[in-house]
Amino acid sequence: MPVGTQGSVKAALHRDVADSGAEIILGNTYHLFLRPGDELIARRGGLHRFIGWDRPLLTDSGGFQVFSLADRRVITEEGAEFQSHLDGARHQFTPERTVDIQARLGSDIAMVFDECLAYPATREAAAESMRRSARWAARCRARLQMLRDHDGQAQFGIIQGGVFADLRRESVDATVDVGFEGYAIGGLSVGEPIEVMYSVVEETAARLPADRPRYLMGAGTPEDLVECVGRGIDMFDCVLPTRSARNGQLFTSQGRVNIKNARYAEDDGPLDPACGCYTCTRHSRAYLRHLHLAGEMTAGALNTLHNLTFYLDTMKRIREAIKLGIFDSFRQEFLRSVSRLSHDS
Amino acid sequence: MPVGTQGSVKAALHRDVADSGAEIILGNTYHLFLRPGDELIARRGGLHRFIGWDRPLLTDSGGFQVFSLADRRVITEEGAEFQSHLDGARHQFTPERTVDIQARLGSDIAMVFDECLAYPATREAAAESMRRSARWAARCRARLQMLRDHDGQAQFGIIQGGVFADLRRESVDATVDVGFEGYAIGGLSVGEPIEVMYSVVEETAARLPADRPRYLMGAGTPEDLVECVGRGIDMFDCVLPTRSARNGQLFTSQGRVNIKNARYAEDDGPLDPACGCYTCTRHSRAYLRHLHLAGEMTAGALNTLHNLTFYLDTMKRIREAIKLGIFDSFRQEFLRSVSRLSHDS
């Protein structure tokens, strides 16, 4: 899922996001709550109509952003009090309130409000936080069931527990016990070693219901997509393709390309010869480098278009490989090719 | 002509520029000479191939940018010495050199190197400057005729002379005497009162050959397009539609819209109900306002798409009105409608 924080995938028109193959995008409840406000969006007919996006939308609960505010938030059993990064105004998010806000936004998939622990955390802190998240998940589910206007809105629970296998198991049991339309794994991709992340994903995904979508939050690299699908994940969101694009970091079938690199100054070839996106079929690396160095907004737009296409093509190729029963060989070949020429990373 | 200073119309992909109806865009020789360099562009096969734009291109001569450098340039009969705004490096532009650079860029229309006087200027300064520009125009034409690789490249002369009617006449005579494929009126839209600009345009255009394109450089507002076509102008370039778009200033069939205005916070209507562009057919004023206030790059992209479409639609409507023999009534109706509701200007 491309990330459309404030109701727009950065540097990409909706048409281009759809053309890249995106079937669903993510909106951030924290940002949309602060600006332009969930009530204003509800008066516009909900987030789909407000932003003019007619495919599915997932909204996070705002938990991750609130916990990232560090010294500008206080967490209690009731919820979180925080100060807006925009104007310092004080607000409160409770599990119930984030359900209400997401119901007003009218996303297709809403996320429960959870506590996102920083890495590293002690076992004790991870346990306490995970259990609070589980209590909050139950409150979110109860609230959703109370609301009359949530028709059609799915709600996903979030598994926490840090890097501790037994805590993850306890979180899975508690969350599945509440019962959701899908399950996410949270609290990863926050600085832990990659093998730890893969291991937690593998053990956790294996215990989640096979008939519900499994969503790994906040990951990751193209390699992470392949590795984590191999461990049972179905859905991802990450700012990496879009943020990297604006910084001139591009993902290709031949590895990473840092378009600022002088080696591309006179390179008339396409960014990725294997890619069929607008950028790769129309422009050269030399031109993309020039636009980036010249600070042109179109550099960000063209790069974003490509990175989104590369990510969504990767997911498409994964799905095809699974259908054909050749996922293992696809995985090996993919990892070899994207790492082979990562000369710029 | 939308302005594509550094080989890209700011905030717009080429596809969107073409969709807006643009038949030709402008590149700035000064900027492209400095970065990425005309020789690098020539090695890429010229500006069309380098930037991936297959419709016509016009390049200016760099004169206007060099003269805008104020205390970082020295003008002599030979040409202009200046310091790059990027790194302070010293360079020299002579009439011959700007012809050579534009030949390497391979634009379809090249402009002669002229001196752009600041407004206001004394009659004496305007006369001296105009006569130097006329001598430079002759040198540019001689240089172009010497070059073997200019096949197909048209060259336009530029009329100077400030706001002085007799100097403008003298400039027309000298420039037409050299002989060019088209003629531009320079040195306007630099701060003079609008009636003065219209008057100089009217008197100057009337004396230019009827069978050659007449191009008013650096203008203007939508009203200027209509008023100056009415005075004999065929071509325009201006950063106004694109720069204004990025600042949230939009041109519509109902007048100016400053999208930041609070009155649009809950306005679900299209930016311009009479416009068929992507922005107007897909998004509301409320969403455009939100994107602009949130600092999203897509605000600039969507606004640019609309403003370009509005400008190019205006030119298209002018052409149709002329063909139908109803230009005068079109002009009156247009000026009435765009000024009627200019509540935000």
Image (spheres, coloured by chain):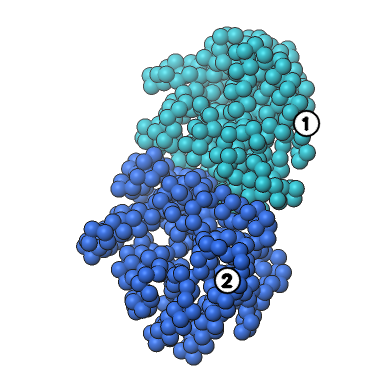
Chain colours: A cyan, B blue
- In the rendered structure, which amino acid carries the disc numbered 2? Leu
Circle number at residue A340: 1
Residue B36 x/y as whole percent: 66, 58
Q: Quadrant of the C terminus of chain B?
A: bottom left
Instruction: Assess disc 2: are there few (<14), some (14-19) or many (≥20) residues with their C-alpha within 10 Å of its C-alpha.
Output: many
Q: Are marks 2 and 1 in contact (CB under 8 Å)?
A: no
Query: Left or right: B253 with respect to B118?
Result: left
Picture quadrant where residue B322 is located: bottom left
Q: Which residue appears at 47% of the width and 50% of the height?
A: B17
Residue B71 x/y as whole percent: 63, 78
Whether residue A134 is visible here, answered yes or no, is: no
Q: Which residue appears at 68% of the width and 22% of the height?
A: A226
Residue under label 2? B144
Identify the subunit bearing mark 1. A
The kind of secondary structure element at disc 2 is: helix
Q: Which residue appears at 52% of the width and 62% of the height?
A: B152
Between the C-alphas of marks 2 and 1, the distance is 50 Å
Picture quadrant where residue A303 is located: top right
Q: Which residue appears at 67% of the width and 43% of the height?
A: A269
Query: Left or right: A26 with respect to B273?
Result: right
Could you say which is closer to the camera, residue A12 or residue A194? Answer: A12
Q: Measured along the vertical axis of the image, is residue A151 above or below residue A82?
A: above
In the rendered image, residues at marks 2 and 1 fall on the same chain: no
Residue A174 x/y as whole percent: 61, 11
- In the rendered structure, which amino acid carries the disc numbered 1? Arg
